[in-house]
Image (cartoon, rainbow, N blue to C red):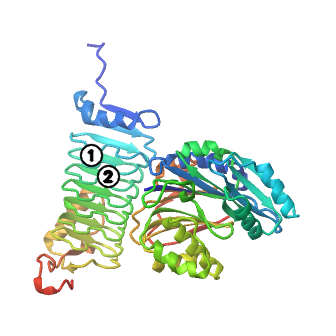
């Protein structure tokens, strides 16, 4: 028995040496076969599409700044970026968790169907655009047109929001703690209920944050754009 | 899609490394702009009595020393020429406008890429790495530079359509995006005597801003006016002899990242063009906010 080596539990890649395709192939195919669930990626240096399309219970840690589409289409996996993310972080996520420790560029969490996206810093414009059921917690502020046409899911914004927050919202709900420069068409502030406060508390806890849920305001759809009004003469 | 890069060094000792620091930035933007590339580099200015003209002969074989001889015969002042293949920088003590007019008439195969006291301009079609090698970008010295890699979407792939665009003296602009009203801008500027060289949308923006500078605006004021006059998507990066400026449109569709340290300010469309820079781990990183003007002076 003394000759048996312990099985490795973690695998490390270095993108200054290993190719992106090698890393993503390992995450897609070999990690599960080898029984590895912890994967570290060093020196991402802004590469695109790192840890895209995962579909396994993996725990991926990326040490540095990443480019476009990190953890896009994620299912089940937990992906943590110790740095900033380029456009489209966790775009179309289905489940799992993506955590950006720095700031995220445009369209973070766009059209995510499920899972939790946590951004510790600011998110740029169009955060959560067309959200379809995922949850997003932003520790900082969000740029203009965030949650545009968001259909389902929740967005918690601990800082401020720029222009046109929640424009043409469907059933998604936004909780915002700071100032909102302007609401988008058909978005409105609504009273916070006990279930809203419980939802914010749960999302903040899941994101590892300690803000007071009582400080958040609820933004939801006024639903005046839900139906086509033939008599409205297109004066929306 | 296109790539933009900008670099301004704050520490005089880094001026000799300007080109070497920039080449990986430009090559890093190859996927965003594989068909053409170019850059404007700002050097120590020539004397008040002199100007520099960046000249380009493209595919044509031009005998630069013969051209220098002809210019010397025409203009009594002192001239020098530094040749880099099909590009040359002419330094002249003659009136720059008169030299440009003379070149148009007597050397029609030579394009004037830029005129000024600090600016040298290089642009050509081909992969960024090839162009960097062709013109020895790694050896460039200077205070700041503005570069571009192009993926043409709205006009032809030719050296003239490559960026940077220049107008007037020591002013250049590169653009990631597309304008929807360049013809309207042009229709407004041409009756004022402003001539265009291409049908490229970016040239309209370049000539608009340079016109405003001549009308007395500073660059920030000119850019503010641009918000109501230029319609479309843009991340503009501009250079003058003393300044580098970046601005994004209200929708910020086109990316940009700034990295600033005590030694330099570096700008690129994406972080992957900045990752190699010295001490990048301690740089302040941010994305320019929409319609906010960021500028740095040498």
N-terminal-most mark, 2 or 1: 1
Contact, CB < 8 Å: mark 2 with mark 1? yes
Mark 2 burial class by Cα count in 10 Å: few <14, some 14-19, many 20+:
many
Q: Position of residue A143 (x, y in %)?
A: 36, 69
Please state the chain letter of the residue tagged with numbered disc 2 in the rendered image. A
Instruction: Kindly identify which residue carries mark 1.
Output: A78
Viewer-proximal residue, B91 or A135?
A: B91
Query: What secondary structure is found at the residue carrying circle 1?
Result: strand
Q: Position of residue B172 (x, y in %)?
A: 61, 65
Task: Work out whether residue A150 can be spotted.
Answer: yes
Q: Vertically, is B290 above or below B127?
A: below
Q: How far is mark 2 from mark 1, CA to CA?
A: 8 Å
- Location of residue A198 (image quadrant): bottom left
Q: Residues within 10 Å of mark 1 (few under 14, many from 20)?
A: many
The picture places residue A233, in percent across and down from the top left corner, at: 17, 86
Q: Do we see residue B143 in this rendering?
A: no
Count of labels shown? Answer: 2
Query: In this view, which residue lies farthest toward the right?
Result: B76
**Residue at (63, 77) in percent of width and height:** B213
Residue B61 pos. (x, y %): 68, 46
* Label 2 element class: strand
Q: Which residue is mark 2?
A: A99
Up-down relation of residue B169 to residue B87 (above or below): below
Quick one: B237 or B294, which is closer to the camera? B237
- Seen from the viewer's position, the closer of residues B231 and B182 is B182
Q: Is residue A107 left or right of residue B158?
A: left
Q: Are marks 2 and 1 on the same chain?
A: yes
The chain identifier of the residue carrying mark 1 reads A
- Determine which of the numbered discs, if any, sits on residue A40 in the image: none
Q: Residue at x 25, y 74 (%)?
A: A167
């Amino acid at each position: 028995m003394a000759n048996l080596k312990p099985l490795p539990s973690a695998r490390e890649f270095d993108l200054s040496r290993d190719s992106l395709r090698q890393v993503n192939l390992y995450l897609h195919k070999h990690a599960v076969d080898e029984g590895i669930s912890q994967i570290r990626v060093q020196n991402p240096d802004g590469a695109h599409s790192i840890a895209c399309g995962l579909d396994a219970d993996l725990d991926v840690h990326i040490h540095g700044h990443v480019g476009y589409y990190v953890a896009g289409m994620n299912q089940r996996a937990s992906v943590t970026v110790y740095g900033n993310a380029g456009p489209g972080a966790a775009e179309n996520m289905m489940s799992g968790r993506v955590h950006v420790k720095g700031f995220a560029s445009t369209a973070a969490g766009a059209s995510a169907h499920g899972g939790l996206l946590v951004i510790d810093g600011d998110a740029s414009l169009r955060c959560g655009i067309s959200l379809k059921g995922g949850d997003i917690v932003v520790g900082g502020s969000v740029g203009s047109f965030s949650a545009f046409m968001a259909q389902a899911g929740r967005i918690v914004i601990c800082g401020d929001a720029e222009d046109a927050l929640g424009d043409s919202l469907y059933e998604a709900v936004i909780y915002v703690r700071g100032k909102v420069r302007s609401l988008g068409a058909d978005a409105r502030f609504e009273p916070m209920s006990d279930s809203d406060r419980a939802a914010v508390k749960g999302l903040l806890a899941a994101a590892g944050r300690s803000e007071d849920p009582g400080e958040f305001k609820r933004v939801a759809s006024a639903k005046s754009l839900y139906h086509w009004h033939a008599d409205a003469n297109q004066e929306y | 899609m296109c790539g933009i890069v900008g670099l301004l060094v704050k520490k005089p000792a880094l001026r000799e490394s300007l080109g070497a620091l920039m080449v990986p930035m430009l090559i890093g933007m190859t996927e965003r702009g594989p068909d053409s590339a170019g850059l404007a580099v700002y050097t120590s200015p020539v004397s008040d009595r002199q100007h520099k003209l960046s000249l380009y002969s493209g595919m044509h074989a031009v005998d630069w020393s013969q051209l220098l001889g002809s210019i010397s015969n025409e203009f009594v002042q002192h001239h020098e020429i530094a040749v880099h293949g099909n590009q040359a920088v002419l330094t002249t003590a003659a009136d720059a406008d008169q030299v440009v007019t003379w070149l148009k008439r007597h050397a029609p195969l030579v394009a004037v890429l830029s005129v000024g006291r600090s600016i040298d301009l290089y642009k050509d079609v081909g992969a960024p790495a090839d162009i960097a090698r062709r013109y020895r970008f790694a050896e460039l010295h200077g205070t700041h530079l503005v570069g571009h890699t192009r993926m043409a979407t709205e006009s032809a792939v030719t050296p003239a359509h490559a960026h940077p665009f220049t107008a007037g003296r020591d002013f250049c602009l590169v653009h990631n995006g597309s304008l929807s009203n360049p013809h309207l801008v042009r229709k407004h500027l041409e009756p004022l005597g402003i001539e265009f060289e291409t049908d490229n949308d970016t040239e309209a923006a370049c000539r608009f801003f340079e016109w405003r500078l001549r009308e007395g605006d500073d660059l920030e004021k000119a850019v503010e006016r641009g918000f109501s006059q230029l319609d479309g998507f843009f991340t503009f990066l501009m250079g003058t002899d003393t300044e580098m400026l970046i601005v994004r449109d209200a929708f910020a569709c086109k990316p940009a990242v700034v990295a600033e340290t005590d030694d330099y300010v570096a700008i690129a469309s994406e972080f992957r063009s900045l990752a190699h820079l010295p001490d990048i781990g301690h740089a302040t990183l941010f994305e320019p906010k929409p319609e906010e003007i960021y500028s740095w002076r040498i």
